[in-house]
């Protein structure tokens, strides 16, 4: 079990959500997205971003238009489709639930003393409680 | 000091250092390779290239004269190398390709879960969630073998060879394959390790086949070498032994199979592999040969490895990398093209499934399987014919001499056998090897060569058939009377002389003659034995037995046919009442086989008896076409011949031969008449027969005078006598 692998696993899940939330605010150019993510201290390689964008575009979540640029070839500016909007909203609720659950778990400090053995069951219980919220 | 070149990159002219250009090219190719299975591959590459071009432009705007190595490195660091973002994106890549583009939002979500089971990083490490699927990415027919191999964590090639062997030994592999095809779902299970069979350019003795095989199966090179060389060694070793044992057929079998058929098989295999498998020249190919992942690092390592061994080539580094990168790009492009073709079937089956009718899918599968089955059967038949030619070789070659005359026909035979039979088999094996081992065909002319050779083979077969039919065109006959002394008993026994030929002939069992239908009794290099002999019985015009011998032959003209017929040596030998016929007649290789036949017409006078021994039926009877137009009309002389059974005693009556056992014994005994009704008619003619006939019957008469059974036994009397003698001798031998 190496830490980097786990970290990248964690990052991976939220990548699409992050990208969509950036684009949702308005048309975005890939390198802007990267910059913004880096500014938010979320490391991402452009080589990872392009395939993701293409995939989202192919899944009709995103659409783009060409914008002439004076510093190179024309740029692709991405924007959200209604379908993407829907998709984003679903992801958002999921994220909120998840964040809540994770935060709750991560910040919980008092009750662990009772039984170290029940670690597994305690991690499962919150996910069960989140489901009724759906 | 560095050379600067201008490149057209995304529609911009960009001055770039040559080394930087090489790095950039490598980088783009590595991306192309990495996204090879991604649906929007070209678009992604294009986007990335666009971005790179933009960064270049920015750099040039800031006052840089050209793009340097460092610039490219910096850009690569920002974009990320395939190796870097592999860990981040690998699973999403596979997920997307697994869904195959039909991904809606929901499916995309679920596919990211699926991706757990279809992870790509390394091919076989998918762990606990491993499922049996047909591999949609690495398939030859339906991906069954590949999927099974992935499931069992072995090399797909081993599984494929196993299935091919199963198919050719009973066809059970076919059924299993079919069931799995229908039952197991197709899914994308990619493996980055693509191993291909190449001939090794570094590790070679003759053509590098053994080296390539060793690399492919990950074994030491000496193993395949020993296997290929073994028959030769054993052959050298066992040669003296064979000599010592005098080359007896029985002893040959063991070493012969190893040195003979297996040896030649391996030799042919080597040659075929030589033809079918390309040699690994570039670094990328060498890596593929060893089954290592082809990416920039490994290529660089391989190239460096080469450099260490060939230090003098140091300056070629750049060009070699360039070359391998180009190769690499070509292949990636080829791959994408073939992918489009391949996806047709996948899509077809996918739509069938999505339409909710699994039946359509199954029908489709069955149809395809049926098609493959037919192809397989044709291949199998061809294979069988070749085997027959190979193993029946010596007698076949002996046979050939009797059919084929002249250089022209010999040439045609050679062409027919090797081109008509050999070429399709070699082509088939080549194709199989290429498919199974993942050999990439670099050129298509091999197919044209095979096709052309085969066509020549077909033409030569047709010419040969025409030429041969010319040789069989005319037919002629030669008629002569064989002088017979009249048997004292009035009964003629016809038997076949026992075999006294001690020359070793190839038994006809060497061919397909399991049931004795083959007219050729046996052959050796000098002569061929035929038993195309027929005996007809007809009524004699006088009171004597007569024997007519008619010899037939075919030839390219009637005169030649007649001269061939003259050369047939078939001499019946008479010993009072016993007429012994030769078992067969020989034709020498000078005369050739031209459908030589012998017809014996035995004329039996009315009232006389005759007996054809059962051994007569060992002759290969043939039909005479009495009214063969254009041929010989022998209608007149042989119109009244009768069908008689062998092993029965017959008596000739005015109506033709009658089986003695079926006649009324009373009438036969009482007088001269064969049948009651015919009494009056035959009075005179049968007068003197009575005495002769009563003589052999007399000894057994007292036992049972009037019964039919009795008659049978007396009829067989002579025969039994004859046979008893034989039995006695065998008894003596046994004691």
Image: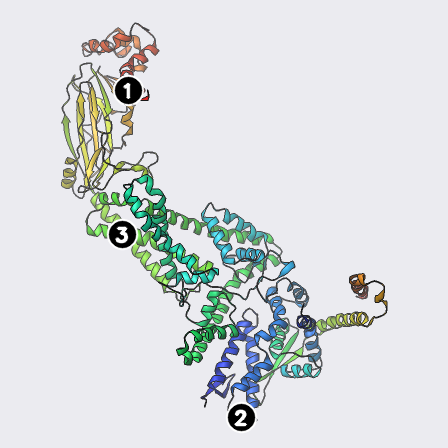
Disc 1, SS:
helix
Gap in Å between the C-alphas at discs 1 and 3? Answer: 51 Å
User: According to the image, label 2 marks what residue?
Assistant: B64
**Crowdedness near tag 3: few (<14), some (14–19) or many (≥20) residues, C-alpha within 10 Å:** some
User: According to the image, label 3 marks what residue?
Assistant: B414
Q: Looking at the image, tell me whether mark 2 or mark 3 is earlier in sequence order.
A: 2
| Residue located 53% across and 51% down the image | B177
| Residue located 53% across and 55% down the image | B145
Q: Which mark is residue B729?
A: 1
In this rendering, does residue B386 appear at all? Answer: no
Q: Residue B132: percent from the left, percent from the top?
A: 60, 55
Q: What chain does mark 2 sit on?
A: B
Q: Residue B731: percent from the left, percent from the top?
A: 32, 19
Seen from the viewer's position, the closer of residues B68 and B609 is: B68
- The quadrant of the picture occupied by the N terminus of chain B is bottom left
| In the rendered image, the vertical position of residue B654 relative to residue B700, given as above or below | below
């Amino acid at each position: 079990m190496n830490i980097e692998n786990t970290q990248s696993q964690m990052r991976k899940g939220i990548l699409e959500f992050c990208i969509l939330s950036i684009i949702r605010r308005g048309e975005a150019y890939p390198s802007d997205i990267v910059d913004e993510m880096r500014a938010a201290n979320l490391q991402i390689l452009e080589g990872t971003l392009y395939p993701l964008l293409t995939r989202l575009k192919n899944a009709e979540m995103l659409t783009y238009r060409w914008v002439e640029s004076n510093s190179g070839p024309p740029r692709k500016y991405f924007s959200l489709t209604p379908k993407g909007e829907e998709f984003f909203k679903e992801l958002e609720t999921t994220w909120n639930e998840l964040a809540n659950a994770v935060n709750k778990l991560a910040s919980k400090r008092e009750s662990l003393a009772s039984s170290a053995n029940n670690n597994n069951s305690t991690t499962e219980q919150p996910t069960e409680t989140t489901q009724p919220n759906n | 000091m560095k050379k600067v070149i201008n490149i057209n990159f995304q529609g911009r002219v960009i001055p770039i250092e040559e080394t930087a250009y090489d790095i950039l090219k490598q980088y783009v190719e590595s991306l192309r390779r990495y996204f090879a299975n991604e649906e929007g591959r070209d678009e992604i590459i294009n986007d990335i290239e666009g971005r790179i071009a933009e960064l270049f432009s920015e750099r040039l705007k800031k006052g840089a004269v050209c793009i340097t190595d460092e610039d490219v490195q910096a850009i690569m660091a920002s974009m990320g190398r395939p190796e870097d973002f592999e860990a981040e994106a690998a699973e999403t890549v596979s997920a997307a390709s697994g869904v195959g583009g039909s991904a809606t939002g929901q499916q995309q979500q679920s596919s990211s879960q699926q991706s757990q089971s279809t992870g790509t990083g390394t091919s076989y490490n998918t762990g606990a969630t491993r499922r049996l699927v047909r591999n949609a990415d690495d398939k030859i027919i339906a991906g069954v073998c590949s999927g099974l191999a992935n499931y069992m964590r072995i090399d797909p090639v081993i599984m494929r060879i196993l299935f091919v062997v199963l198919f050719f030994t009973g066809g059970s592999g076919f059924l299993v394959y079919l069931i799995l095809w229908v039952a197991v779902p197709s899914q994308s299970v990619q493996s980055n390790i693509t191993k291909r069979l190449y001939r090794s350019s570094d590790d070679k003795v003759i053509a590098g086949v053994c080296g390539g095989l060793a690399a492919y199966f990950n074994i030491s090179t000496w193993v395949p070498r020993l296997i290929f060389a073994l028959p030769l060694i054993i052959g050298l070793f066992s040669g003296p032994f064979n000599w010592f044992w005098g080359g007896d057929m029985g002893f040959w079998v063991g070493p012969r199979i190893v040195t003979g058929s297996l040896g030649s098989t391996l030799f042919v295999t080597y040659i075929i592999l030589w033809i079918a498998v390309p040699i690994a020249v570039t670094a990328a190919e060498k890596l593929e040969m060893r089954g290592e992942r082809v990416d920039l690092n490994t290529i660089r390592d391989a190239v460096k490895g080469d450099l260490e061994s060939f230090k003098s080539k140091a300056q070629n580094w750049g060009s070699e990398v360039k070359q391998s990168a180009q190769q690499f790009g070509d292949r990636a492009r080829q791959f994408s093209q073939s992918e489009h073709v391949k996806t047709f079937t996948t899509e077809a089956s996918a739509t069938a499934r999505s339409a909710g009718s699994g039946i359509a899918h199954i029908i489709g599968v069955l149809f395809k399987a049926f098609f493959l089955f037919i192809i397989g059967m044709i291949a199998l038949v061809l294979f069988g014919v070749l085997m027959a030619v190979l193993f029946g070789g010596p007698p076949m070659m002996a046979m050939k001499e009797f059919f084929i005359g002249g250089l022209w026909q010999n040439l045609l035979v050679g062409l027919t056998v090797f081109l008509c039979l050999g070429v399709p088999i070699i082509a088939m094996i080549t194709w199989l090897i290429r498919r199974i081992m993942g050999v990439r065909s670099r050129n298509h002319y091999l197919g044209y060569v095979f096709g052309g050779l085969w066509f020549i083979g077909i033409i030569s077969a047709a010419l040969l058939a025409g030429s041969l039919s010319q040789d069989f065109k005319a037919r002629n006959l030669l008629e002569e009377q064989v002088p017979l002394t009249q048997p004292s008993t009035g009964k003629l026994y016809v038997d076949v002389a026992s075999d006294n030929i001690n020359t070793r002939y190839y038994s006809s069992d060497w061919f397909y003659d399991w049931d004795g239908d083959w007219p050729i009794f046996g052959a050796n290099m000098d002569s061929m034995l035929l038993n195309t002999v027929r005996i007809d019985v007809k009524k004699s015009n006088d009171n004597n037995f007569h024997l007519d011998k008619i010899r037939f032959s075919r030839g390219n003209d009637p005169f030649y046919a007649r001269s061939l017929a003259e050369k047939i040596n078939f001499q019946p030998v008479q010993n009072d009442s016993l007429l012994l016929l030769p078992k067969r007649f020989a034709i020498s290789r000078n005369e050739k086989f031209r459908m030589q036949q012998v017809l014996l017409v035995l004329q039996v006078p009315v009232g006389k008896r005759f007996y054809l021994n059962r051994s007569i039926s060992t002759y290969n009877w043939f039909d005479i076409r009495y009214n063969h137009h254009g041929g010989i009309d022998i209608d007149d002389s042989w119109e009244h011949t009768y069908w008689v059974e062998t092993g029965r005693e017959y008596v000739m009556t005015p109506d033709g031969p009658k089986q003695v056992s079926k006649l009324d014994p009373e009438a036969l005994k009482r007088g001269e008449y064969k049948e009651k009704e015919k009494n009056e008619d035959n009075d005179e003619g049968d007068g003197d027969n009575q005495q002769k006939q009563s003589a052999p019957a007399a000894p057994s008469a007292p036992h049972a005078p009037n019964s039919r059974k009795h008659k049978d036994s007396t009829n067989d009397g002579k025969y039994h006598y004859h046979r008893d003698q034989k039995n006695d001798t065998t008894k003596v031998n046994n004691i």
